[in-house]
Image (cartoon, rainbow, N blue to C red):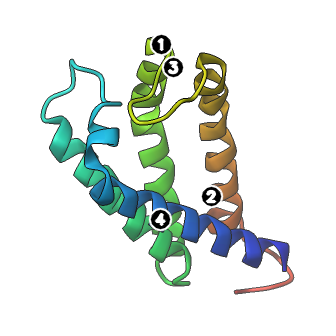
Amino acid sequence: MPKIVSRWVLALFFVLAGANHFRVPELYVAMIPPSFPRPEVLSALAGTFEILGGIGLLVAGARRFAGWGLIALLVAVFPANLHVARMGHMEGFDFSATVLWLRLPLQAVLIAGVAWVALIRDRSLRI
């Protein structure tokens, strides 16, 4: 049961985070390092893949693919989170620099959570 609840929580997290890329695009565009090309497109792609990955976590036949996709996405967006931490502020939020640095390990927690709910099969239960 904890795995099912965690799967739903992560799915909701990714769908809402992805949707937020379209609701407040300037927030996410501002996070992308200036050396990256076409930040608006990258932000929209990240949001789209977050939504699709979140939904995919809930579909048994797509779960493993969605899990690997979300893990790849979390690795891919790490430079943006590091960029924000190094800047010491996040456009649109009043987070302290400490909070921005503490967000970085959250990527590893999310990767571990996605791996658990999407990639690690339970021997006793097939859901």
Q: Which mark is residue 85?
A: 3
Residue in the image at 40% along x and 37% along y: 76
User: Within the image, what quadrant is residue 23 found in?
Assistant: bottom left
Other residues around mark 3 within 10 Å, as few (<14) / some (14–19) / many (≥20):
many
- Looking at the picture, does residue 64 appear above or below residue 44? below
Q: Quadrant of the N terminus?
A: bottom right
Q: Which residue is mark 2?
A: 114
Give the amino acid at mark 1: Arg
> Is label 3 in contact with label 2 (beta carbons under 8 Å)?
no
Tell me residue 114's x, y (percent): 62, 58
Q: Residue 107: which quarter of the image?
A: top right
- Sequence-first tag of 2 and 4: 4
Please name whichever residue, 9 or 56, is drawn nearer the observer in this view of the structure: 9
Question: Nearer the viewer's eye, disc 3 or disc 2?
Answer: 3
Neighbour tally class for label 4: few under 14, some 14-19, many 20 plus, Cα within 10 Å: some
Q: Is residue 87 left or right of residue 100?
A: left
Q: Residues within 10 Å of mark 1 (few under 14, many from 20)?
A: few
**Real-space Cα distance between discs 3 and 2?**
23 Å
Looking at numbered disc 2 in the image, what kind of residue is underneath it?
Val
Which badge, 2 or 1, comes first in the chain's sequence?
A: 1
Residue ID for mark 4? 16
Q: CA distance from mark 2 to mark 4?
A: 16 Å
Q: Are marks 3 and 4 in contact (CB under 8 Å)?
A: no
Labelled disc at residue 86: 1
